Amino acid sequence: MIDDEAQIRRLLRLTLEEAGYAVDEAETGRDGLREASRRGPDAIILDLGLPDVSGVEVLQALRERSAVPVLILSVFGQEDRKIAGLDAGADDYLTKPFADGELLARLRALLRRVKPAVASNRFRFGPVTVDLERRLVTKAGRPVKLTSMEYALLQLFITHRDKALTHRQILRELWGPKAEGQTHYLRTYLMRLRRKLEPEDETPGHFQTESGIGYRFVSDPEN
């Protein structure tokens, strides 16, 4: 859940955890995007009135890389606000104040909609298969253990496959604006991904270096 009101977050956490959900929370839009990238949630509850960026901007950023169901919660009940949120990629809209029962019913409905797509939501490159819904990675049929940050980096590459990503883009996305100059973070995690997923560390085929720019994940490199 992404909401800047501590009282609302406490209420949501109590309601959702009592219903059996595991809950992560963020106070700002940027923190929410970063946590969503790291954790790969099954659904997101999003407030439109955030202190740093608008909820619509958060939605647009989410939709560039994910089809995760998004339920908007907002004090803005006007029709034009609802339309803007839905047009930006939200799946449903609930106006504050709301009843706990209705919130849970809408969330269950969103999760039911995405279940049929689970089996086909897989990405393959070389001998590696990534199950994006279950967050499972296998190589030649054997499980590969990735840390949460290694998986977040892999997911980012898959989302933007075959495109050059700058060091700054990757660092901002995964570690936040204050980490934009910390390229050693990126080198370390990329080295780990290459070691775990490439056939040969010395000649990386999928995780390629763009000299002076950043990196490019190539899903089907030429021989």
Image: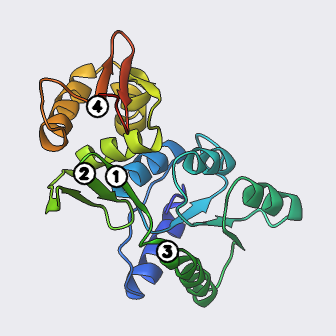
Residues 214 and 81: in front is 214
Lower sequence index among marks 4 and 2: 2
Tags 3 and 2 touching, CB below 8 Å: no
Query: 201 left or right of 180?
Result: left
Residue under pointer 1: 124
Q: In the figure, 93 relative to 66: above or below?
A: below
Residue type for callout 1 = Arg
Residue 178: image quadrant is: top left
Within 10 Å of the Cα at label 3, are there few (<14), some (14-19), or many (20+) other Cα atoms? some
Residue under pointer 3: 12
Residues 33 and 87: in front is 87
Query: 87 left or right of 23?
Result: right
Secondary structure type for disc 1? strand
Query: Which marked residue is nearer to the observer: mark 4 or mark 1?
Result: 1
Query: Which marked residue is nearer to the observer: mark 4 or mark 3?
Result: 4
Q: Residue furthest toward the front?
A: 223
Secondary structure type for disc 4? strand
Tags 1 and 2 touching, CB below 8 Å: yes
User: Looking at the image, which residue is at 18% across and 38% down?
Assistant: 198
